[in-house]
Image (cartoon, helix red, strand yellow):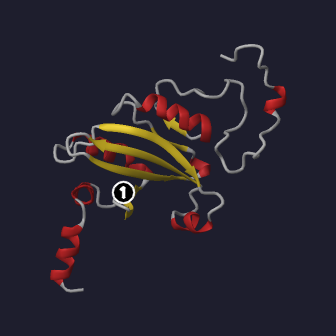
Amino acid sequence: MSEEQEVTAEEQQPLVVQKVQEQYPDAILDVSDARGELTITVRKDAIYELMAFLKNDSELAYNFLADVTAVDYSLMEDVLMKYDYARFTVVYHLLSTEKKERLRVKVPVHEKELSIPSMTSIWKVANWLERETYDMFGITFEEHPDLRRILMPDDYEGHPLRKDYPLRGRGERETFNFEEQNV
């Protein structure tokens, strides 16, 4: 590839990718643009600083955290191999209300180190979103101010959105007390 072609390819990168590569050159694992939806996959050890940068940089201004969720890739060998057998991926959906641009940020998380930094100090809304992800997948958010179940009862065992959770449940429908409130 000639120098001119390299410059042209770099110019075609979205501004957010260029700025993240400048600021955190080793953080990006993958960039994809499918159907106009930009996704950046980044290393877990860089996620907190990178997310603060995405919010606070005046040119990017991703000021709205729309969602936090996770994906269990335990049954997808090709994805597991791509990220050194990280079973889970935490997914953040960001929006720049000024620029009207969306960005998806993914972070591979290994089952043996099932934690990731909390984003609650950057976006307050992360509190509830991270609690939901914790409840459904069992991923711990470090330094979260109130990490406890939000959808399932406190004494519930397991995480229903994991691929190894039985399709018909573990008998909770038969033992669930519908007469009393479960608060």
Provide residue 43's location: percent of width, then percent of height.
Answer: 42, 55
Provide residue 2's location: percent of width, then percent of height.
Answer: 19, 86
Provide residue 162's location: percent of width, then percent of height.
Answer: 65, 46
Q: Quadrant of residue 182?
A: top right
Residue bearing the label numbered 1? 37
Residue 151, above or below 138: above
Give the farthest residue toward the bottom: 2
- Residue occupying the point 27% across, 55% down: 20
Please name the amino acid that badge 1 sits on.
Glu
Q: Which quadrant holds the C terminus?
A: top right
- Residue occupying the point 61% across, 42% down: 137
Residue 87, above or below 116: below
Left/right placement of residue 120 relative to residue 151 reads: left
Give the farthest residue toward the front: 35
Packing grade of label 1 (10 A; few <14, some 14-19, many >=20) is few
Pick the residue in front: 85 or 40: 40
Pick the residue in front: 176 or 72: 176
- Residue occupying the point 24% across, 86% down: 1
Regarding residue 94, the answer to whether it shows in the image is yes
Q: Quadrant of residue 85?
A: bottom right
Regarding residue 27, the answer to whether it shows in the image is no
Numbered-mark total = 1
Residue 15, above or below 139: below
Provide residue 102's location: percent of width, then percent of height.
Answer: 32, 48
* Mark 1 element type: strand
Pick the residue in front: 56 or 32: 32
Left/right placement of residue 160 relative to residue 174 reads: left
- Residue occupying the point 58% across, 69% down: 78
